[in-house]
Image (tube, rainbow, N blue to C red):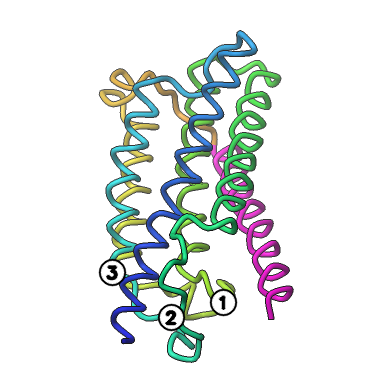
Amino acid sequence: MREGRTVYDNLKKVISWTLPTNTGEGLTIVLALLLGLALPVTAVQILWINLITGITLGVALAFEPTEAGTMARPPRRRDAPLLSGELVWHVVLVGLLFLAAVFGMFSYAIDKGYPLALAQTMAMNTLAVLEIFHLFFIRNIHGTSLTWAAVRGTRVVWLVVLTITSAQFAVTYLPPLQAMLRTQSVPLLDGLLIVGVGAVFFAIIEIEKQIRLGLRS
């Protein structure tokens, strides 16, 4: 029974991570097209993000261990939908936060007079950072993500995070990959700002989860 609940939870985590992140990416492109603006992230950069994060982060969630208190939860109804109203709300919330963060970082870079390629590189890296922070959030859907066990994660999670981080550094700073993805080197302070945006994003969705769990109990 415990293993069955773990498998169901992990399936839900994969869906809860994939749908919002893809929604955020899609909203960013659609809004730019509707407003007649330059794309914050190019098509090939979106493809890169989906290849490097969609495969690895989704796989990492499939290996998540059983959450604490799993057997203390009441059984779910057999007809309970996997795509619940709560999940739909999470998709909308995270999608809008992705949209605000990516467009905000892109606009910040343009306002500073950076070349379009550098602004798009910063927006692409913002997407990658948000998806990593979202992974650490979604690992605990029934409790807080602000525990040492949650931060420590698993070997698979940290292997995936290190792989993605290394890949992003490579496409951002190595000339051959810069030529392929039309990226430019991001200044150190702007890189730290991108990580800060990811931390703020994590704080917002974690606060929302705590409020939601508190209302449920």
User: Foreground: 105 or 90?
Assistant: 90
Q: Which span of residues is magenta-colored?
A: 188-217
Label 1: how many residues lie within 10 Å, few (<14), some (14-19) or many (20+)? some
Identify which residue is drawn at 73% across, 68% down: 211
Task: Name the magenta segment's main secondary structure.
Answer: helix
Marks 2 & 1, CB-CB < 8 Å contact:
yes
The residue that label 1 is drawn on is: 143
The correct choice, above or below, for 71 with respect to 59 in the image is below
| Marks 3,2: beta carbons within 8 A | no
Q: Earlier in the sequence, mark 2 or mark 1?
A: 2
Q: Earlier in the sequence, mark 3 or mark 1?
A: 3
Quarter of the figure that contains the C terminus: bottom right
Q: Is residue 92 left or right of residue 170?
A: right
Quadrant placement of the N terminus: bottom left
Disc 3 is placed on an element classified as: loop
> Between marks 3 and 2, how big is the CA–CA gap?
12 Å
- The residue under label 2 is 67
